[in-house]
């Protein structure tokens, strides 16, 4: 198609312009990020005659939950179950001009390692509809961990599928916790 430049051509032109720098770039890839406007992860220098570029990966998908006035209670429960760190900020903390919302949670962030769970209460008058169309999956490291988490999250909730070994080689179970949030727990089993 006339007037369309393929990515391959752009990369080859960029390579041709930067070819004298390739030996240096292998040792100092940040030079290329400044010169070529690509991140260090985008470039793999294979040899003097070839390099490849790839698209950016997404950083993460982070679940964001809404509760109707009980976000603090729910997130404290999850923090206890996961032995995680919790930060909570209310509308009152930021002096938001919403009468009656001072104690409602504007933003809660639960973290453990690189895992993140976010939540908030809506403004007064904004309805929350709890449904079964969203599930949070917890990928566990061990059978001991999945068993412990399933019991902890199931406290006061409803088991949908009890923990069991599956045909796909994992231990798996599903439940709805006492706040109406749906959870799936999965742990890959060692190959036998």
Image (cartoon, grey):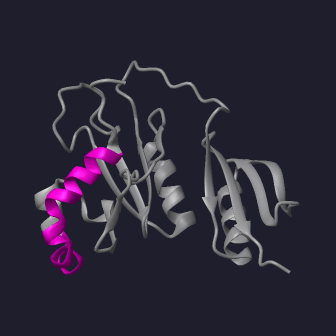
Closer-to-camera residue (60/102):
60
Front residue of 19 and 7: 19
Question: Magenta stretch containing residue 27, yes or no?
Answer: yes
Residue 2 picture quarter: top left
Q: Quadrant of the N terminus?
A: top left
Instruction: Please provide percent x and percent y for residue 55.
Output: 37, 50
- Please give left or right for residue 100 compared with residue 159 in the image: left
Q: Which residues are magenta?
A: 8-29
**Residue 45 point in image, percent of width and height:** 31, 71
Give above or below for 66 relative to 31: above
Chief secondary structure of the magenta portion: helix
Membership of 156 in magenta stretch: no
Q: Please name the residue shown 18% across and 41% down the image.
A: 94
Location of residue 26 in the rendering, given as x and y in whole percent from the top left corner: 24, 77
Q: Residue at x 37, y 53 (%)?
A: 109
Residue 77 or residue 144, whichever sits in front: 144
Viewer-nearest residue: 184 or 69: 184
In the image, is 167 to the left or to the right of 37? right
**Residue 5 location, x and y as percent?**
29, 35
Picture layout, residue 80 above or below residue 37: below
Question: Would residue 69 be found to the left or right of residue 33 on screen?
Answer: right
């Amino acid at each position: 198609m006339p007037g369309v430049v393929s990515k391959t051509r752009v990369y080859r032109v960029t390579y041709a312009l930067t070819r004298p720098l390739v030996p240096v770039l292998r040792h100092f890839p940040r030079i290329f990020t400044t010169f070529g406007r690509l991140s260090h992860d985008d470039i793999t220098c294979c040899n003097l005659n070839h390099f490849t570029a790839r698209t950016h990966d997404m950083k993460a998908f982070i679940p964001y939950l809404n509760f109707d006035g009980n976000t603090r209670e729910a997130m404290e429960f999850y923090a206890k179950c996961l032995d995680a760190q919790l930060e909570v900020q209310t509308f009152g903390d930021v002096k938001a001009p919403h009468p009656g919302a001072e104690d409602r949670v504007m933003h809660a962030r639960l973290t453990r390692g690189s895992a993140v769970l976010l939540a908030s209460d809506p403004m007064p008058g904004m309805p929350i509809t709890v449904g079964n169309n969203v599930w949070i999956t917890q990928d566990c490291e061990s059978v001991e961990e999945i068993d412990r988490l399933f019991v902890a999250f199931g406290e006061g909730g409803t088991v949908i599928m009890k923990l069991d070994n599956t045909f796909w080689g994992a231990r798996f179970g599903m439940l709805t916790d006492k706040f109406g949030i749906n959870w799936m727990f999965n742990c890959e089993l060692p190959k036998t």
